[in-house]
Image (cartoon, helix red, strand yellow):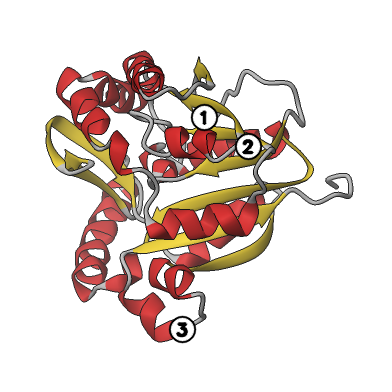
Amino acid sequence: MKPTPRLEAAVRSAYEDEAQVGAFSAIADEGLTPFETALVRRAFVPGQRLLDIGCGGGREAIPMARAGFELVALDVSLAMVRAATARAAARGVSFKAAVASAAALPFRPGAFDGVAMLGQVIAHIPGRHGRIAALRAAWQALRPGGTLVMTTHNRRCHWKFSLYFGWVNRWRRLLRWLGCGLELGDHDRWSARISRSRASRPVFFHMYDLDEATADLREAGFEILDGRARAEFEAGDTDPALRRRDYLLGFVARRPRDPRP
């Protein structure tokens, strides 16, 4: 399903909202979560050139730059990029920054050793067409053999999500079959929250599960190196029982060294 311009504009405007910029800036000093730290350590080596897609207020970018990565922070929101760079400068940290859509990255092919899409940023890209385009853009930005880390929600973690989407997806499919124009696809939602604050306007996000996220990464050309729940990464273990209960999933994927067919 291809996203409409109105839906894409709604996502962009939500992250330009002054209250949300303030909320993302307020949590910037919290840095990477243990989950994200485990992913970064699994995938990257200090000194590598990394692209942080969806940098927000700098929560991920600042500690990664401080850890010795040559970092470029990118966000669709100019206000977020300004907040991230200002926060970094106030803490004696510097990195390059850019404003662009995740699906239209302004970099030469193979410019990065690694790409980070943390904070479930992929979920806020409308439409499978848009999410695949963003993953393909990340693939293109990576050198052959370069690595992507990505986090998503996990709609399989609780029965309430299965019940909700089981009901709402049927109605959406019926309405589409009847010719009604719908902007939301299967497993899409509007939320009243971004980060931990209440949003001034509804925010779009898509809820993945492990199989769907794996399929999208492969569709974009990636080789999956690891895909598990947050608790599994934090514990350094593989445990399907943890995966069934955890709200977040993490992925490590690689652009193959061989030319893409």
Tell me the residue that label 2 is attached to. 138
In this view, 107 is above or below 29: above
User: 131 or 196: nearer the eye?
Assistant: 196
- Where does the image place residue 247, in percent across and percent down from the top left? 31, 65
User: 163 or 230: nearer the eye?
Assistant: 230
In this view, 130 is above or below 73: below
- Where does the image place residue 111, in percent across and percent down from the top left? 73, 28
- Label 2 crowd (10 A; few <14 / some 14-19 / many >=20): many
Whole-number angstrom distance, CA of label 1 to CA of label 2: 8 Å
In this view, 102 is above or below 150: above
Tell me the residue that label 1 is attached to. 102
For the image shown, how many numbered marks are present on the structure?
Answer: 3
Asked if the residue at tag 3 contacts the one at tag 1, i.e. Cβ–Cβ closer than 8 Å, the answer is no
> In the structure shown, which secondary structural element does the residue marked by tag 2 occupy?
helix
Q: Quadrant of the N terminus?
A: top left
- Where does the image place residue 77, in percent across and percent down from the top left? 37, 19
Q: Is residue 113 left or right of residue 160?
A: right
Q: Quadrant of residue 167?
A: bottom left
Q: Is tag 1's residue or tag 2's residue first in the polypeptide sequence?
A: 1
User: 255 or 51: nearer the eye?
Assistant: 51
At 45% from the left and 74% from the top, the residue drawn is 232
> In the structure shown, which secondary structural element does the residue marked by tag 3 occupy?
loop
Q: Name the amino acid, label 3.
A: Asp
- Label 3 crowd (10 A; few <14 / some 14-19 / many >=20): some
Tell me the residue that label 3 is attached to. 239
Whole-number angstrom distance, CA of label 3 to CA of label 2: 29 Å
At 85% from the left and 47% from the top, the residue drawn is 261
